[in-house]
Amino acid sequence: MSSDIESFTAHLQSSKRILALLGAGLSASSGLPTFRGAGGLWRTHDAISLATPEAFGRDPALVWQFYSYRRHMALKAKPNRAHLALAELAKKHPGFIALSQNVDGLSQRARHPADKLQLLHGSLFNVKCTSFYCSYHAENFTDPIVPALRIPLDESDPTTKEARHAVSQNHKEADIADAQVHLPSVQVADLPKCPECHEGLLRPGVVWFGESLPSKVLNAVDSFINDSTKIDLIFVIGTSASVYPAAGYVDEARAKGARVAVINADRADEPAGGLTDNDWFFEGDAAQIVPDILKTIIGEVEQPIGML
Ligand SMILES: [Zn+2]
């Protein structure tokens, strides 16, 4: 395992096919509360119990309020230099694709070409029809998506000390009740409707707990890895890649001769199979490191002012 930038750069420049696995750490410096670390009135426990098809079936208004909040927070965050650098690499390098576990929409907003970006867990900014007979799905960045889902001002910032303090004072059941007390009541009739069949409710296009990963995405990545031409380089950025199927991709690509470059804030967060002498590990903030180590291919990356 090495952090030698020269040997990495030499390998990068000769790499014809590159895969990047992207996780939450990529967006860490974009000012986005992580799903599990989210504070405010929507606490961790609530978040997990709300991210299920059962929760949506039981109370679609509450689940939509939660997702409207998450969309709002994600839109307040900005793509950082790592999102921009990867988008640039995707534009300049024909043999590069990224597989992201993030639903925050930041890669899309950094103009990462859609055909070079596979979304393993969907996106907060995708919507799809819940009707069994309808296959409508679309990208939607409107905030709020419908007027009834406007986020009340006092809930828009869960990072305030007051909000954290309020949460720490309560038990989880109390928090759920608390959240419901502060949330305006929303009628199902006012939730986003399918513009195609005019019958189904729309739902967030994310993969919920208990749902299977999108087979289109899995197939695309499988065929990229199992192409007759081997992968030269696999990036693991801001994720421990310890969960299926990401862990398997690292092993598979490595077995076919790919070299591995890990960029992570924490040395402990290495891929499940561990690192070898042949791998690179760059420790720190992805927003600093990624543009730096890609510089020889993409040039300097500047954060554009007033980016969407
Ligand atoms: Zn529909």
Image (spheres, helix red, strand yellow):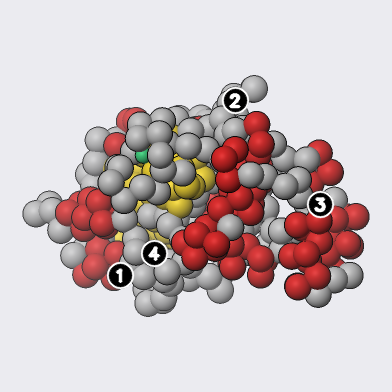
Q: Which mark is residue 112?
A: none
- Whether pointer 2 and pointer 3 mark residues with C-beta atoms closer than 8 Å, the reply is no
First along the sequence among labels 4 and 2:
4
For the residues labelled 1 and 2, the Cα–Cα distance comes to: 35 Å
**Kind of residue sitting beneath label 3:** His
Q: What secondary structure is found at the residue carrying circle 4? A: loop
First along the sequence among labels 1 and 4:
4
For the residues labelled 3 and 4, the Cα–Cα distance comes to: 30 Å
Q: What secondary structure is found at the residue carrying circle 3? A: helix
- Which residue occupies 46% across, 44% down? 201
Q: Is residue 114 depicted above or below 68 in this figure?
A: above
Residue matched to label 2: 307
Badge 1, how many Cα within 10 Å: few under 14, some, many 20+?
some
Q: Which mark is residue 248?
A: 1
Residue matched to label 3: 182
For the residues labelled 4 and 2, the Cα–Cα distance comes to: 33 Å
First along the sequence among labels 3 and 4:
3
First along the sequence among labels 3 and 1:
3
Badge 2, how many Cα within 10 Å: few under 14, some, many 20+?
few
Q: In this orientation, does residue 84 appear?
A: no
Q: What secondary structure is found at the residue carrying circle 2? A: loop
Ligand 1 located in image quadrant: top left
Residue matched to label 4: 211
- Whether pointer 1 and pointer 4 mark residues with C-beta atoms closer than 8 Å, the reply is no
First along the sequence among labels 2 and 3:
3
Residue 95 placement, left or right of 119: left
For the residues labelled 1 and 4, the Cα–Cα distance comes to: 19 Å
**Kind of residue sitting beneath label 2:** Met
